[in-house]
Image (spheres, rainbow, N blue to C red):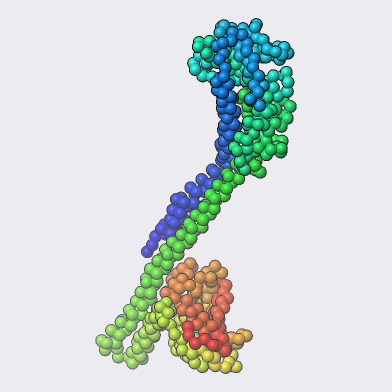
Amino acid sequence: MIKKRFIIKPWLIVGMLLVIPTSLFTAIELLKLNDQEEVIESIYTKQLESVLYSINQYSDDIANNWINILYKDIHPADYESTLEQPLNNFPQLESFILHPLDSVSLNLDDFRISNDTLRQEIISQLQTNSNEIAQLKRYMKSGYRKIIGIDLEYRQHLSMLVFVSEQENHYYLNILLVNAQRFISEALSPRLQMVAGDDLIIVVRHSKTNELIASSLLNEAPDEVIKEQAIWLLPDYKLGILPVGISIEQLARDRARQNIGLLILVDLLLIAGAWLFYRNVKRELHLAKVKSDFVSNVSHEIRTPLALISMYAETLQLGRLKDESKRLKYYDIIYRETQRLSGIVNNILNFSRIESGRQKLSFGQVALNEVVDEVLTNYHYHFNEKGCKVTQNLSPELEPIKADKQAITECLINLVDNGIKYSGDIKELTISTGRKGKYQFIEVKDKGIGISPKEQKYIFDKFYRVTKGALAHHAKGSGLGLSIVMHLVKGHNGQIELESEEHAGSSFRILFPINNQTTKA
Ligand code: ADP
């Protein structure tokens, strides 16, 4: 006998090992959806920042390149005071100013250039940034040339690039006057387009006026950007970037949602798989239980008639029975028990033939009333012994139909047998025949224990037995009878109708087509 707890276990195993952890994981992931979006967003923002960084780096490279070219021609050591030199070969640069920077503090007394207003502004800006300039000098002493950008108000888009240089232990303040607009649109713009490609839009605007200076889309530019960064060398100008078509939040949300969607799909597949697994295991366990019950039920059913036969045969064999009527009664009992045994064996043989597909029906002309008559005559003694009252209600106008007489007899025996077996105190059977549409039928009606609607769905399954209720529990059987009936009726293209009410009785009706074309089961 298989213990019940093994049947419950698959639920627990499948639930604990697969479904619960994955569902929990999905729930946690769903809760973390916002965090994930933020993480993806911050990664993406960092990527945009690094694109801007690379553009800034590039503008630094351009400036350094200019300085290297300039220094090929200039020898600042020859100049003791300010040198001002126009730069006609560099379209984006206006002039180059060099001023000695040897004293500890910034000394701009003899800082002289041609335009006095410009001079005033440059001096004022240099003094404001004197700390940075001191820092530039320290950098230079350590061998690093850093350039800083300072915007000038003297003229729109005029900026100065400031750095310190060293020549034979003398330090010089270097100023490059640059036309910021030209620098951005001529020198930086091609780079913007290259870096932006098809996925990004990069724009440069003036920070204060918001004037568009350059765009990777040439003359077009979006109003809003995702990330902004000032140009290192031109602090009054800012680089802005945004992805084409889709917003970064949207992108992050789509990514996160896609992942969660996949996870849920995997979960669903897993749950479906787990459910199928559970169902299969449950079915297998149920079958194993039912088969083992079957063996014990059948052996029990066989043992009882065998014990009776051997007991009465032994008594007769001893020859002590003088009373002739008693002897006849014993013979009769032996005969009936043998009949009962052969009924059981017949069912098992039928079942095994059905299972192996060897069951063949042999069709001939069959009168249903005749089948009923024969079975009732054969069972007459049985009914008397069980105290069962049988009423016949046979329709007189039934023509013979094409059917297998033996198969219909087996069906009827099984139904009658059940009718008696599952009747309590009121043992009354009504056996009717009749016609219904294209069918002729035999109906066996009892006033027995009835069958609950739930059980009605299963009683035609092989091995299925109802074990609830005292009578059903004690009645003997193999659970094969109705499954054989169902199979044989189907072999005739027939139908079974069942009406039953608990504690009131049942009516089984087997219907056979009048014009049957079927030739085998
Ligand atoms: P068995 O009678 O050997 O158990 P069956 O396949 O003939 O197997 O019947 C299956 C189940 O259907 C029975 O165990 C019984 O519970 C129920 N059943 C069959 N016929 C009747 C009936 N006439 N009244 C009540 N229950 C019935």
Please give the name of the residue rendered at 37% of the width and 71% of the height, measured from the top-left corner: 296
Q: Nearer the viewer, residue 314 or 353?
A: 353
Instruction: Decide: is 286 above or below 229.
Output: below
Which of 341 and 198 lies nearest the eye of the viewer?
198
User: Above or below — where is 305 with respect to 121?
Assistant: below
Residue 508: x and y in percent read: 54, 79
Considering only vertical position in the picture, is 22 above or below 402?
A: above
Left or right position of 360 against 320: right
Query: Does the rendering let one see residue 248?
Result: no
In the image, taking residue 110 as reference, residue 362 lies left or right, namely: left
Please provide percent x and percent y for residue 379.
45, 87
Count of numbered circles on the image: 0
The quarter holding residue 237 reads top right
Q: Is residue 109 or residue 440 the one in the foreground?
A: 109
Quick check: 98 left or right of 287? Answer: right
Q: Residue at x 35, y 90 (%)?
A: 328
Q: Residue at x 64, y 17 (%)?
A: 85
Q: Position of residue 262 (x, y in %)?
A: 54, 50
In this picture, is 130 found above or below 395? above
Q: Position of residue 403 (x, y in %)?
A: 51, 89
In the image, 221 versus 422, the foreground residue is: 221
Q: Identify the residue shown where x is 55% and y is 15%.
A: 75
Q: Is residue 91 visible?
A: yes
Question: Farthest left residue?
Answer: 318
